[in-house]
């Protein structure tokens, strides 16, 4: 496994503590570039916490302790002089609940490029169109870019958030249960989109839904009680899990 | 034994009555003001109010021009808002976004305490300390100026602005901030481009409430603005506000005289001003809410 893959992210001996709680225990994992990796496991197993260590979104939580190393293209992202702004530009994130800003569709997409210093209107317009097309939303919103993004449907809002993340041209896209609040049609749109995006981006997706993991991912990691129990190619993990606990979970015996 | 339905109805009626009381009271205030002010229209006529001279007690000719009182109130309110808004909003931002929990626990009670100080005490402080300070700093013949009043009023408006703005900033969903951070924004960028715009309706309401307090405040301004009914835009000049005029003169005015009725007109203008302020505040909030 992973022999023929280019590796994007390497996590070694990662331990995360929330005060007294040991949230992640000795995680070792290699995430391949331009593939989609699903993180599955029951609630509270640490999969979201793990996802957030990859773009250091956990940093702001009070009393958090992070040990071990996470490297992105061989660069330790927890080194003391790491520029978090650049890191987050390279590693984008889409949240569980869609969270567009209360601004126009255009301003939502242009937000990222703008904070990174782009002012040129025609370049911004170009990025907005490209990002919206990439997120399969352009046709639906091209005539109302100046309308407030909160007027879009739930599924559209989530695709807008994906477009917003793509607008800063990231290399990695982290998704935290991006379809859990959506109806089946919107979910299927998002899944098709993920399938397309993984050609260009390294995708790490947390999901509760095992069918979804099976549908959209090339690799799957199963977390339980803060430990990484099993990691493998999605197909083999779902058909021939090598660890009993994984089998119990994916066959629905607990979780 | 009263049935559940009957109880429900009784509570409903009780609440309807309580809620309508405020409406009735406002209506009665308008009615009362109108009744006392109305005879002035017949004699000596409304044109007497539109004059630049307020000199209600005179052996030659009494003058009831309320324009200097209006400009006095405007000048003091404008200056006070100018001082109070930056301090109030910056204070709110600091408390809700930057201060550590310990600092917040320490700061908030002090700000609330400041809001509770009786205005006459603040006026006393203004008269004894602020006025001499203004006099010396700007080398003026007197420290009793529009600026002194505005500074005091700003001091009184700041706690209101801080408390209400802080609520608004606190209630901005964390998800907006997370989205901004995840795109690589710094704390300052997130604050300026996401948090403050999202809280703008609340901040506007806070500013309007603060201004409401400033316009209606009487005691402190009466003590420190010098009470000269002159039309001026000079912050270092003495002015007389509408509120101070009513407070200072109502006690001595002969009942039913022209002077008495003129004071009611001042009250009406003041009431309209406050109404307009509230109306604008509501429109701004509504407009912003529609946009979001």
Image (cartoon, rainbow, N blue to C red):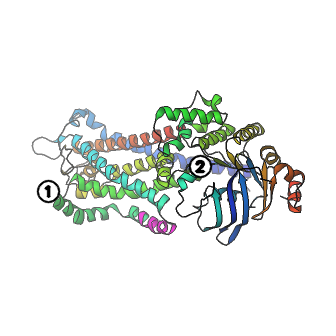
Q: In the image, is B96 to the left or to the right of A189?
A: left
Find residue B207 and report its horizontal and vertical position in percent: 40, 49
Q: In the image, is B274 to the left or to the right of B284?
A: left
For the stretch drawn in magenta, the main secondary structure is helix
Q: Of B3 and B279, which appears nearest the observer?
A: B279
Disc 1 is placed on an element classified as loop
Which of the 4 image quadrants contains residue B45?
A: top left
The mark tally for this picture is 2
Find residue B109 and report its horizontal and vertical position in percent: 45, 67
Residue to which mark 1 is pinned: B140
Q: Chain of mark 2?
A: A
Q: Is residue A198 above or below residue B250?
A: above
Q: Of A120 and B185, which appears nearest the observer?
A: A120
Q: In the displayed image of the protein, which residue is found farthest to the top? A: A143
Q: In the displayed image of the protein, which residue is found farthest to the front? A: A4
Give the CA distance from mark 1 to mark 2. Answer: 61 Å
Q: Which residues are magenta?
A: B101-111
Magenta stretch: includes residue B110? yes
Find residue A121 and report its horizontal and vertical position in percent: 47, 33
Q: In the image, is A153 to the left or to the right of B269?
A: right
Magenta stretch: includes residue A10? no
Residue A201 seen from this side: yes
Q: Nearer the viewer, mark 1 or mark 2?
A: 2
Residue to which mark 2 is pinned: A90
Q: Residue at x 28, y 61 (%)?
A: B123
Q: Residue at x 17, y 41 (%)?
A: B53
């Amino acid at each position: 496994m992973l022999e023929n893959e280019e590796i994007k992210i390497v996590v070694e001996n990662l331990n995360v503590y929330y005060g007294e709680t040991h949230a992640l225990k000795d995680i070792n994992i290699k995430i391949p570039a331009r593939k989609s990796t699903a993180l599955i496991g029951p609630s509270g197993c640490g999969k979201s916490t793990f996802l957030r260590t990859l773009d250091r979104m956990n940093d702001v939580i009070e009393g958090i302790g992070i040990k071990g190393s996470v490297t992105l293209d061989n660069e330790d992202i927890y080194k003391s002089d790491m520029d978090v702004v650049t890191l987050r530009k390279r590693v984008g994130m889409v949240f569980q609940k869609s969270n567009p800003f209360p601004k126009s569709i255009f301003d939502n997409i242009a937000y990222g490029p703008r904070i990174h210093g782009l002012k040129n209107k025609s370049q911004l317009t170009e990025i907005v169109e490209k990002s919206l097309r990439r997120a399969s939303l352009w046709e639906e919103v091209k005539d109302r870019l100046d309308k407030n993004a909160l007027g879009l449907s739930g599924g559209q809002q989530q695709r807008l958030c994906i477009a917003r993340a793509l607008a800063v041209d990231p290399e990695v896209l982290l998704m935290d249960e991006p379809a859990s609040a959506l109806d089946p049609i919107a979910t299927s749109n998002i899944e098709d989109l993920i399938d397309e995006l993984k050609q260009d981006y390294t995708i790490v997706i947390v999901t509760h839904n095992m069918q979804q993991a099976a549908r959209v991912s090339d690799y799957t990691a199963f977390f339980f009680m803060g430990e990484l129990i099993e990691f493998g190619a999605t197909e083999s993990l779902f058909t021939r899990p090598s660890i009993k606990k994984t089998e119990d979970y994916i066959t629905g015996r607990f979780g | 034994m009263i049935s559940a339905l009957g109880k429900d109805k009784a509570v409903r009626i009780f609440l309807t009555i309580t809620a309508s009381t405020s409406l009735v009271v406002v209506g009665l205030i308008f009615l009362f003001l109108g009744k006392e002010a109305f005879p002035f229209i017949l004699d000596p006529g409304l044109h007497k109010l539109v004059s630049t001279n307020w000199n209600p007690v005179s052996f030659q000719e009494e003058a009831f021009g309320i324009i200097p009182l209006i400009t006095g109130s405007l000048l003091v309110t404008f200056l006070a808002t100018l001082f109070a808004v930056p301090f109030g909003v910056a204070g709110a931002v600091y408390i809700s976004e930057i201060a550590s929990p310990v600092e917040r626990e320490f700061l908030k009670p002090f700000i609330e305490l400041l809001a509770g100080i009786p205005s006459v005490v603040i006026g006393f402080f203004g008269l004894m300390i602020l006025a001499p300070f203004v006099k010396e700093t700007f080398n003026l013949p007197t420290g009793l100026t529009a600026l002194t009043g505005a500074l005091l009023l700003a001091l009184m408006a700041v706690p209101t602005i801080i408390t209400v703005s802080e609520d608004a900033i606190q209630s901005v969903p964390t998800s907006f901030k997370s989205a901004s951070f995840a795109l690589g924004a710094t704390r300052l960028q997130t604050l300026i481009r996401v948090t403050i715009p999202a809280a703008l309706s609340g901040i506007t309401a806070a500013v309007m409430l603060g201004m409401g307090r400033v316009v209606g405040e009487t005691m402190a301004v009466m003590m420190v603005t010098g009470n000269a009914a002159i039309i001026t835009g000079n912050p270092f000049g003495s002015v007389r506000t509408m509120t101070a005029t009513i407070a200072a003169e109502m006690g001595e005015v002969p009942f039913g005289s022209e002077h008495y009725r003129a004071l009611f007109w001042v009250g009406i203008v003041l009431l309209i001003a406050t109404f307009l302020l509230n109306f604008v505040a509501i429109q701004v909030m509504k407009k912003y809410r529609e946009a979001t």
